[in-house]
Structures are given as C-alpha cells and as structure tokens.
Amino acid sequence: MTTPTINSSLRRSLILSIIAALLAITCVVALGTGTISLSPREVLAALFGQADAKDLLVIQKIRAPRVLTALGVGAALGAAGACFQSISRNPLGSPDIIGFTTGAATGAVAQIVLFNAGVWATGVAAMISGLLTAAVVYLLSFSRRTTGGQRLVIIGIGVGAMLGAVNTLLLSKGDADLAAQANLWLSGSLGGRSWADALLVGIAVLVLIPLLVAHSRSLTLLEMGDDTASALGVGAETVRRIVIFAAVCLTAAATAAAGPIAFVALASGQIIRQLIGNRSVPIIPAAMTGALLLVSCDVLTQHLPLQAQVPIGLATSLAGGLYLLWLLTRHRVRT
C-alpha cells in the first residue's frame, strides 16, 4: 500500500527539481539576452560583481529587475490560478478568465490616465479595484449560502466584460499621451521594469503565497464538496474568503507590475496537475510553473524574427487563446 505513495512522492520531487533547474537555466539565458548578448559565464560573473562596468550596468540596472519581475509575476499568477481553479472546481476558473485581472487593470488604468501615478500608487489602485471586483463577483455568485463552481465562472466572465468596456472608456476620455501609456501597459510588458516593480510583486509573493499554502489542505478538502469538508472541520466560506482575498491581491500585484498577462494563470495549475497528479492543490508547484512559463515566453519574444519587440502580454494571449480552445474541446470540461 505504501509503494504507490512513495513512487508518487519521488515523481513529484523529481518533476519539481527539473522545473527548478529549468527555471534557473532560463533566468541565466534571459539575463544574457538583449541588444548586448552575454554568455552564461559573463552573466554569472556580473551577478557576483566580478564583471566590467558595462556588464554590471546591463545586468544590475536593466535585466535583473526585468527577470525578477517576470519571476514574481509568473509565480503570483500561477499560484492565484491554481487557487481559483480549485475554488470554482473548473479549469477555466482563472483570474484572467473570470474578470479579476480586468478588475485590477481598471484601477491601474484610472490611476495612469487620470493621475499619471507611479508604480506604488498604481499597485494600490489595482489591488483595491481587484478586491472590489472579487467582492462583486463573490456576492453575485453567492447562492444557497455557498459560492464557487460554474456560477462563479459565468458571473466573473460577465463582470470582466463590463469592466473591459470601462477600461476602453477611460482610454478614450483621457489625455492622449497618458492614454497611449496606459494602452501600452494594457498590452502587458516586461520592458523597462524597475526595481520598484520587482519589489512590489516580490513582497506580494513572499507574504501571500505562504498564506495560501497554509490553507492548501482545506482547499483540497473543499474540492470534495462543502458537506464533506464541513464534516472534516473546514469552514468552507471562511476558507474561500481568505483564499480569494490572497489570490486577488496576488493577481493585482502582478497586474500592477507588468500589466494584464494572459495564459499563465490559466495554464500553470493545469500543467502541473497533469505532471504530479491531483493529491492536493499545487500552490508552490503552480507558482514555479508560472514563473518558468513567463520567463520562457519573455526569452522567446525577444528572439522572434520581427523588427519590433512583441509585448509579453500579446504573446501569452496568443498562446492562451490556443490553450483555451484546446481546453474547451475536452469532454470533461463542462460549459
């Protein structure tokens, strides 16, 4: 009876080790990618302060903030996506599908267009509007003293569509230069990221992912149904509120740091569940997968044979659209 469990644990550890190794390699490649190409040896030398002044400037001032922002944003979206999919019991229960990313973007766009705000003010506005969006979706989906499931997804899609129209209205009514800046931000980009962006999403990841991990067992029990979870001593709605709050804050911080990024939250949890199984809600594995996906996409977009650099949000949107079409064709996804 113990052999399958041991084999499963070994497989999980092996897969997570491979993901961690791939993530480290991809980060080194990302740090060496750009107008000035650097070899892995030069990248490592610059990271340890043993390179010349030019390489140190490129790595420490330009590329390190970009890569760390990508790591934080990917981890935040991966963990948030796994949580929302667990709460809704639906693989489409991703913050970019059910409107929470759009809700966070509404506050950020308003700050940029109306007040020309900086990183931290934009981040605060994104978190507030994201939480308000989550509260509206939660209350509208509340039925028979419970929430979650298909109702949460459907209502979230509707609220997200309405907020998308609000974002368009803000762009059309704002100052042309600020509207152009906000429109570029809405495409999702890692270009020009600063240490402030990396710090914003890094703090969110370090504070909120441990909170989600602490409730991962309760989330796993909730997937069996509220009655079963309650019989095992889990307060279903209390756990949902805590998890939704933390996951929305992660989504908002990621959106504030890099703009709306599609696909990563949707795919990370599903990919890692296919690899390691469904024994529990994979918070940290999904975060690692999300970070790997986003950094890899950033490297790929910088190597596309185009005259202009493609914003990361557009590249992930294309990949996400294809993944969503594939997901919808699977018989076990109920729409």
Image (cartoon, grey):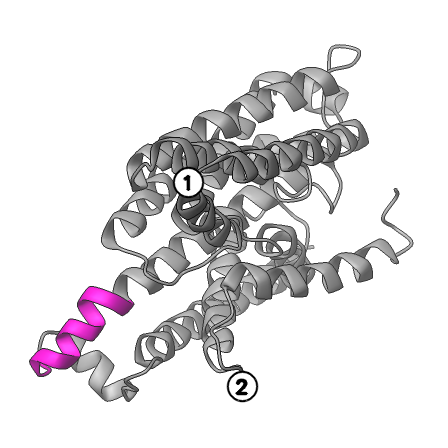
Q: Residue at x 43, y 39 (%)?
A: 175
Q: In terms of secondary structure, what is the magenta stretch mainly?
A: helix
Residue holding disc 2: 305
Q: Residues within 10 Å of mark 1 (few under 14, many from 20)?
A: many
Q: Residues within 10 Å of mark 2 (few under 14, many from 20)?
A: few
| 7 horizontally vs 209: left or right | right
Q: Residue at x 87, y 57 (%)?
A: 330
Disc number at residue 177? none
Q: Residue at x 30, y 87 (%)?
A: 37
> Disc 2 residue type?
Pro
Q: Find residue 23 and report its horizontal and vertical position in percent.
A: 42, 69
From this view, report whether residue 24 is shown above or below residue 117.
below
> Disc 1 residue type?
Ala
Image: magenta residue range: 50-63
305 or 95: nearer the viewer: 305
First in sequence: mark 1 vs mark 2: 1
Residue holding disc 1: 253
Q: Give the foreground label among 1 and 2.
A: 2
- Magenta span contains residue 53: yes
- Magenta span contains residue 17: no
Q: Find residue 207 and report its horizontal and vertical position in percent.
A: 34, 37
Q: Find residue 77 and report its horizontal and vertical position in percent.
A: 52, 48
Report which quarter residue 217 is drawn in: top right
Q: Is residue 74 visible?
A: yes
Quadrant where the image shows the C terminus: top right
